[in-house]
Image (tube, rainbow, N blue to C red):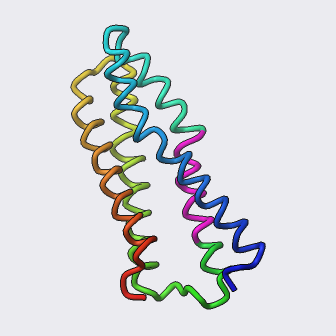
């Protein structure tokens, strides 16, 4: 049942939204290093605007498309499987870090508070680690 057109469409949308959601995790550190001379404020303001409009919603959409994949798999994958449950916990944690740590740190950086840079870096590292955990869960599916 995972060879259906609907399943493949949900998989495409799921992967595309993940790529969009995690692009800043790769780009932000490079931007901060490259534009340090021009000021962290400008970069942080641009990242914050993109996170609100693009990356945050893409992270939420990735979870929604993941749910659609489980439903479209026609009982191949189920919500009570260990890897699916763990993936939901990791996804909730990612959203928590994004909205409770990264976004406030970016707001403070955009306002000129450079002390928030360490929280921004810590939040970014946490998101990166959670992303790697999520990849592990999606590829190896422990408890399947």
Taking the image as shown, residue 24 lies to the left or right of residue 33, namely right
The x, y position of residue 59, in whole percent, is 52, 53
Q: In which quarter of the view is residue 134 placed?
A: bottom left
Q: Quadrant of the C terminus?
A: bottom left
Range of the magenta residues?
A: 54-66
Q: Residue at x 58, y 58 (%)?
A: 15
Q: Residue at x 66, y 59 (%)?
A: 13
The x, y position of residue 30, in whole percent, is 37, 27
Q: Residue furthest top?
A: 38
Which is more toward the observer, 42 or 37?
A: 37
Q: In which quarter of the view is residue 38 placed?
A: top left
Magenta stretch, overall SS: helix
Q: Quadrant of the N terminus?
A: bottom right
The x, y position of residue 84, in whole percent, is 46, 78
115 above or below 42? below
The x, y position of residue 26, in whole percent, is 41, 39
Q: Is residue 57 magenta?
A: yes
Q: Residue at x 43, y 55 (%)?
A: 95
47 above or below 133? above
73 above or below 6? below
Q: Residue at x 39, y 54 (%)?
A: 96
Taking the image as shown, residue 135 lies to the left or right of residue 75, namely left
Which is more toward the observer, 96 or 2?
A: 2
Number of marks: 0
Q: In which quarter of the view is residue 69 placed?
A: bottom right
Taking the image as shown, residue 5 lies to the left or right of residue 29, namely right
Q: Residue furthest bottom?
A: 75
Which is more toward the observer, 139 or 130?
A: 139
Q: Residue furthest right?
A: 5
Q: Is residue 5 magenta?
A: no
């Amino acid at each position: 049942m995972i060879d259906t057109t609907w399943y493949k469409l949900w998989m495409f949308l799921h992967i595309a939204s993940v790529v969009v959601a995690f692009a800043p995790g790769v780009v932000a550190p490079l931007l901060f290093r490259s534009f340090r001379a021009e000021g962290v404020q400008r970069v942080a303001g641009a990242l914050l605007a993109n996170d609100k409009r693009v990356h945050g919603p893409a992270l939420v959409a990735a979870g929604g498309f993941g749910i659609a994949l489980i439903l479209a798999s026609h009982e191949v994958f189920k919500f009570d499987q260990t890897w699916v449950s763990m993936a939901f916990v990791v996804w909730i944690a990612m959203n928590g870090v994004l909205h409770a740590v990264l976004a406030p740190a970016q707001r403070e950086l955009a306002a000129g508070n450079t002390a928030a840079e360490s929280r921004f870096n810590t939040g970014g590292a946490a998101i990166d680690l959670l992303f790697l955990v999520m990849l592990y869960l999606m590829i190896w599916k422990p408890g399947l």
